[in-house]
Image (cartoon, rainbow, N blue to C red):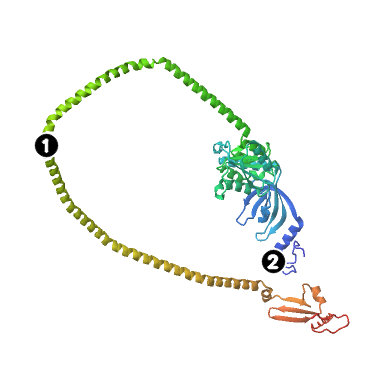
Amino acid sequence: MDLIDDDTQGPGGNAPEFTVSEISGAVKRVLEGEFGRVRVRGEVGRVSRPGSGHLYFDLKDDRSVLAAVSWKGQVARMAVRPEEGMEVIATGRLTTFPGQSKYQLIVDEVEPAGAGALMAMLEKRRQALAAEGLFEAARKQAIPYLPGVIAVVTSPTGAVIRDILHRLRDRFPRRVLIWPVAVQGQACAPEVAAAIRGLNAQPAAGLPRPDLIIVARGGGSLEDLWGFNEEIVVRAAAASRIPLISAVGHETDTTLLDYAADLRAPTPTAAAEMAVPVRLELLAWAGEQGARLTRAVTQRGDARRQRLADLGRGLGRPAALTGPARQRFDLWSERLGPALHGFAARKRNGFGPVAALVRPELLRRFMADEARRITERAARLNPAQMARLARAREALGRLATRLAPALVRARVDALRANTERRRALSGLAERLHAAPRARAEALAERLARLDRMRQTLGYTETLRRGFAVVRAQDALVGSRAAAALAAALEIEFHDGRLVVLVPGAEPAPPPKPRKARGDHGGGPDDQGSLF
């Protein structure tokens, strides 16, 4: 009976009854058989990607909405992922989702509806990133004049890396680090972003930190260069603390990475030329500057020497300047001898009366007084030292009295700490001893659960719910025609098996008895055992 026929026989008619699952399955078979694989053009709306990795979105036009879903594996193979507001052409198969009584498109390929859609999405993304300030000139860093280490992020097998290395070798050989990445396809954007972040954290990997990063790729279509328009690449370039040169495509190609980079090069070869100067030109410039410096120093010395000579001519003759002073020196030197003799005679005459008053008895008396004074001071010094020593011993005794309880407390604290450590070690030993037993019990419990699951999923549980298995000559019987050809049927229930004879059927020939393994009799063609 056709499912869409009207039931005109009333409630007591012969119309069959269908379950919800049967109706849903019939609708699914009709829909999938009628349409199969289709291509649908529309605008993307309501994009959702949960933690499972699947992608759910809507395809809509001005009158209808079609639900679409891409499974995790299909999403990984997509060259362009749908974004809200993007006009695309989705390819997939039409099916139903019985859980929500709706139909949907299982999408395995998405392509933009023409270059205009990609350019519109690219412009929208550029404006959003520019609004965050990622393209501002104030964020850009100066390119070093002569970097010591240059990192190149590109494909290791293309012509781009050979052109860059050749150009650097011709201009100014530098140390180059190559970070291999995919420059096209789904893996391009994540690998390029990871390379930029990894180079910024380079000292952690044991390699020298680069002074400059060049992200390079050859020319291609808009779809080929789309990985360099992804948001993760733009944000990684904007957050780079190392100056970055973008050299993606030809001079006419423009990507969002060009806006976020510190400098844009029209080609990869031009990026190498911007990175380093020409060594021979630099040597020539340095030689010219050295010659200019030598000429400047020579001219400066000559000018100072001439100035000194001019100032010297303005001064008088040295003999004329020192003549009066030499004459005064000669005059005073002639007067110095008689003056010294007169001064010595006057002092000698003044010392004569004083020397007459100094006798040996006075000197001996003075020395005796000094000796007595020293002895008295020495006698007073010994008791003072003994008293000081006694005070020191008393202070030392007090310190010793205070030190003994402190030692006792230290010993008690050490014993308490050792006891606590032994207790903690005993607890750890008990846990270590109980861990294997707990692990074995957990594994046994898991095995029991798996065995119960095996019994639940087996066909014996299905037999307990009223079903039966029909066999004929050890083969399953799945239709009435097969049952009519069998002489006898064996029906297995949950509590045993039952043999049923089919009326009118020819009995099946009895099975041939198997020859015993030890029986070697027979005709001349029988082959006996090798043993």
Instruction: Determine the secondary structure under disc 2.
Output: loop
Specify which label sits upstream in the sequence, 2 or 1: 2
Tag of residue 19: 2
Q: Amino acid at mark 2?
A: Thr
Tag of residue 359: 1
Q: Quadrant of residue 211?
A: top right
Q: Quadrant of residue 220?
A: top right
Compared across the picture, whether 380 is left or right of 288 comes to: left
Compared across the picture, whether 420 is left or right of 348 comes to: right
Vertical side of 452 occupied by 351: above or below:
above
> Which percent across, then down, holds residue 45?
64, 49
Q: Is residue 68 visible?
A: no
Q: CA distance from mark 2 to mark 1?
A: 152 Å
Q: Is residue 10 visible?
A: yes
Vertical side of 260 occupied by 97: above or below:
below
> Which percent across, then down, holds residue 325?
31, 18
Residue at 50% of width from left, 69% of height from top?
A: 432
